[in-house]
Image: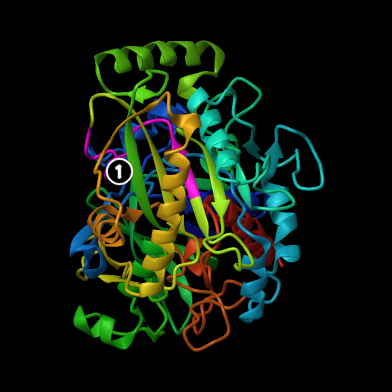
Amino acid sequence: MEFDYIIVGGGSAGCVLAARLSEDPDIQVCLIEAGGAGRGILVRAPALVAAMVSGRPRINNWAFHTEPQPGLNGRRGFQPRGKALGGSSAINAMLYVRGHPSDYDAWADLGCEGWDWESLRPYFRKSEGFQGGDGPYHAADGPLQVRNQTGPRKISHAFLEACDAAQIPRNADFNGEVQDGAGFYHVTQFHDGPQAGERCSTAAAYLHPMMARPNLRVLTRTVVEQVVIEDKRATGVRIREGSVPSTIRARREVILSAGAFGSPQLLLLSGIGPEDELAAHGIAPTHVLPGVGRNLQDHLDYVISYRSRRNDVVGLGPKGLMRLARAGLAWRKTGEGLFASPMAEAGAFLRSNPTRSRPDLQIHFVIGIVDDHMRKMHFYDGYSSHICVLRPHSVGHVGLQSADPTAPPRIDPAYLSDPRDLQTLMRGARIMDQILDSEPLGPWRGTRLYPHDGSDRALEADIRARADTIYHPVGTCKMGVDDRAVVDPQTRLRGIDGLRVVDASIMPMIIGGNTNAPTIAMAEKAADLIRG
């Protein structure tokens, strides 16, 4: 088989690229995804994310683990990543957050010309189909449906009242004029048509409606084992469908969109990366590129959970499961109610210190107990609040476990390796404690999970014992102009023709917020760069 463009990875970036590049009927595009079609009820029903994120069993989820983390008492962290068309947009909480404009201006300051906020803002708008219509901060005509939540729970309103009590201002739109404050998240969810109330993954938004295009071929449950390099040019990929290997050739370009873990892993398997990493696994170097797999950045998350005295939250006891079943039946009829909830309904962007120029902390308030990524089950009603450091100083890396393409990558986020992150996270935990202990949440507040005496020593111990990712790994094929850059500002791999990387791995620095919407906007821009 031969195509003009081969896209490896059908996630948030890959679906956008496949849809945009195949708009030209004279261009032949092949999209290759290791997972399935991403159309099942577990993906479509927002509340059923809980059945996928734990990775038990592995449904639409790579369910990776990190190397033991010295900063987390030697624990191995858990890294859920989407394994289906739509990628992690098929298993996330659907939160639509663009980040702070200064994040993108900082990219430009690092030499990524054309990636400043004003240059990237049109691509956020191009992608967005906002329920509230066109306006100064949103656009209505894009394929990605974005909506206001339909009827957040009473406890989520109480959380915002608790933020009022803590002198945190209200913010009706985290993607609007300012990011600071507390409010309800916008969500990537269908707001009209027959799919109203369903998750709007990038596959549902961009790819599924275009699958009948004669110039677009989509291969699912297909593993890419290596990029074929000939005379310093990418000419195709070696794949395996089941037990059958074959090669697909690219007339123009191979584009890696396998994510912050998958893209550097595939480059390394293809002999592209740091010389010592390749030698350690007996891989002959095709092109020495020291930055591949380096610069891993992620948002470390600390959770406080409570048992609820009221039952208008999510619970896994017999009565709670009965309420969920009724809510599921109602959702099938109306597209609304508890089953349409992102679970992380409300949140806040905060400054750990008033002298900060922008928020450096983010809260996700969840209407159920999320303990160890739903891997520790509690069979009663409850709620949780999560806080993360938005711009961590700790930087890790991704490498290989072995030269076997089916082995998971070696992931080392190096959480809390920089002591500044712990201090910021502790300040954030103190603010979150103040919110959760305030009067508006009193009617719900029952027994706290993992209580401690409140001292700095006890708080640090609890963070090191329980903190883990909030699912935003980026940076491992960073874009830039320095010696550690993997791709240039046109997303082209440095030193190899016909090869690009387009996904969250090319972010030179992590952004201050959830990373799905930025990844989609980046892919929109990259599609224009590719088309010239």
Q: Is residue 393 above or below residue 244?
A: below
Residues 181 and 240: in front is: 181
Q: Quadrant of the N terminus?
A: bottom left
Q: In the figure, is residue 298 to the left or right of 362?
A: left
Q: In the figure, is residue 300 to the left or right of 189?
A: left
Q: In the figure, is residue 103 to the left or right of 509?
A: right
Residue at 42% x, 19% y is: 312
Q: In the figure, is residue 240 to the left or right of 137?
A: left
Q: Is residue 314 above or below residue 421?
A: above
Q: Which residue is mark 1?
A: 373
Q: Position of residue 489 (x, y in %)?
A: 62, 75
Q: Say whether residue 273 is magenta.
A: no
Q: Quadrant of residue 197?
A: top right
- The majority secondary structure of the magenta stretch comes to loop
Residue at 33% x, 49% y is: 80
Residue at 37% x, 61% y is: 262
Residues 364 and 165: in front is: 165
- What amino acid is labelled 1 in the image? His
Q: Position of residue 86 (x, y in %)?
A: 47, 44
Label 1 secondary element: loop
The boundaries of the magenta stretch are 363-377
